[in-house]
Amino acid sequence: HVKDWGLRTTGLYILLTSLKVSNPIHLQFLSEVGWSFLEASMAVFMVVVLGLCICVALLRWNEVRYRKKGLPPGTMGWPVFGETTEFLKQGPNFMKNQRARYGSFFKSHILGCPTIVSMDPELNRFILLNEGKGLVPGYPQSMLDILGKCNIAAVHGSTHKYMRGSLLALISPTMIREHILPKIDEFMRSHLSHWDGKTINIQEKTKEMALLSSLKQIAGIESGSKSCEAFRPEFNKLVLGTISLPINLPGTSYRRGFQGRKNIVSILRQIIQERRASSKTQHDMLGGLLRTEESRYKLSDEEIIDQIITILYSGYETVSTTSMMTVKYLHDHPRALQELRDEHLAIRKRKGPEDPIDWNDYKSMSFTRAVIFETSRLATIVNGVLRKTTEEMELNGFIIPKDWRIYVYTREINYDPFLYPEPLTFNPWRWLDKSLESHNYFVIFGGGSRLCPGKELGIAEISTFLHYLVTRYRWEEIGGDKLLKFPRVEAPHGLHIRVSNY
Ligand code: HEM
């Protein structure tokens, strides 16, 4: 009967007979069920095999597509997606594994582009120092679109020199000493008031701090003012837009980022108009940009706006995340906290309670500076920088095609045991030897013609923040919040501390 039903699989026949199923109705039922089960299994099996074949073919095709003569070794992963998932999921381990297989200079396909990853310290230095020779910043399109076409990362050559010169004039040591530091001091004093007895999400507070402090320095926009409240949500949209996929559809972060930019531009245009209508001289960054008669740099309104957005954006995540991580490391290392506190209490002792931090105080904070460098190193706030080839070029003996990204991956140098003995230990004292800050492989702030122009400004902000934090308060971490280290340092649910008066 089983055979009559055309069940050719002896397996099922044996199964049925060994189960001693003899009732013809049962046999018929079981054979039908068995047949459809087998059919379904076969179909699933075929789909899996076909799927596997397609996967292998796609992987192979993608490898062959990029097998150009002269390219460095490496794998390209899936068409379109490349190895982005592995890169984001495994992070630094993905880089280390690829380096173990292919050396310190390998090809991959990450974040939507064919990319050369360079983990070689010498070569990284060479790339940073040789921007003019066919290498320009290679930041994602969404970032360039939303930050504006006059943004410093979007311009090269003489335009870059001009925009950079104008920026350096605004945040030079003299400007910090005379005009910016007093504003930072006033801001931090008020931002860090009334924390006693409170539970604070220090990630949120430091983000707020980085934005609001910049707004005050740039255009005297005070926290809580109408302009400030209008600015904040738009800036948040802009930031999210720069790290999104460039899909310009309603509801996407990219579209919202553009809207954020549009609204920020109109707020800034209004402020510029008001400034021009008034005869008052303003000693803030916008004042400096508008006083063209005194300056070598005469920017158009569009350039002024993009310059302001650059300052806000570049100092936002860098300063806030470094500040958050100093709070974390100081909490975990009481000896370092004690030494830092002693440094700041000694400064306070020399001054009246209402006296602001001045340039000399800032310059005397050598242990604070060491804590900031050690935090940036150990947490690796910036994993590397991106460049793009503008023409086919030879690099490290390989031929890199035009428009390929180069990921100058600097993370590993931060954990080099020759430069930093016991690299995984938080040891700010190592930075008291000043030569460490000026060695060739100190790339926490980048290098070459794009070395961070905001380095001193950023350190001055974080130092003043730490001054008011440690002289006023003690804190305890609560909740054991999770910290992600890659691709960005962040606490996905915030980093909560309970604060009490010191
Ligand atoms: C702790 C804080 C900071 C860190 C770790 C940091 C890090 C860096 C790094 C690694 C670069 C190099 C990017 C590249 O080569 O493509 C850079 C560039 C830059 N940074 Fe910073 N930065 C910090 C604070 C600031 C601040 C406060 C500002 C505000 C003005 C700023 C403005 C810039 C600008 C405008 C550039 C681009 C320079 C150019 O392309 O010529 N940074 N920063």
Image (cartoon, helix red, strand yellow):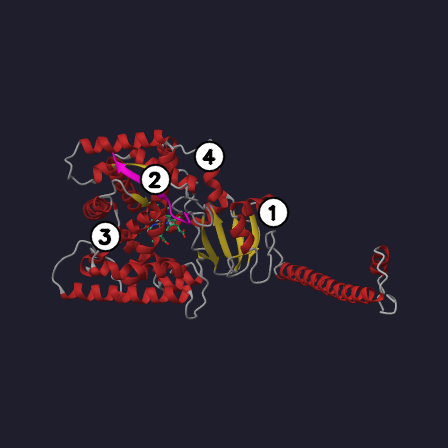
- Asked where in the image residue 337 lies, by quadrant, the reply is top left
- Whether the magenta-drawn stretch holds residue 81 is answered as no
- Whether the magenta-drawn stretch holds residue 496 is answered as yes
Distance from Cα at disc 3 to Cα at disc 4: 36 Å
Kindly tell me whether mark 2's CB lies below 8 Å from ligand 1.
no
From the top left corner, tell me how far across and down residue 245 is, in percent.
46, 63
The residue identified by callout 3 is 217
* First of labels 1, 2 by sequence position: 1
Q: What residue type is labelled 3?
A: Gln
Q: Which amino acid does label 4 sit on?
A: Pro
The residue identified by callout 1 is 102
What residue is drawn where x is 34% and y is 39%?
A: 327
- Asked where in the image residue 233 lies, by quadrant, the reply is bottom left
- Is residue 362 in view? yes
Kindly tell me whether mark 4's CB lies below 8 Å from ligand 1.
no
- Quadrant that contains the N terminus: bottom right
What is the span of residues highlighted in magenta in the rendered image? 490-502
SS state under label 1: helix
Q: Which mark is in front, 1 or 2?
A: 2
Q: What residue type is labelled 1?
A: Tyr
* First of labels 3, 2 by sequence position: 3
Q: Which mark is in front, 3 or 2?
A: 2
From the top left corner, tell me how far across and down residue 173 is, in percent.
25, 45
The residue identified by callout 2 is 327
Q: What residue type is labelled 2?
A: Val
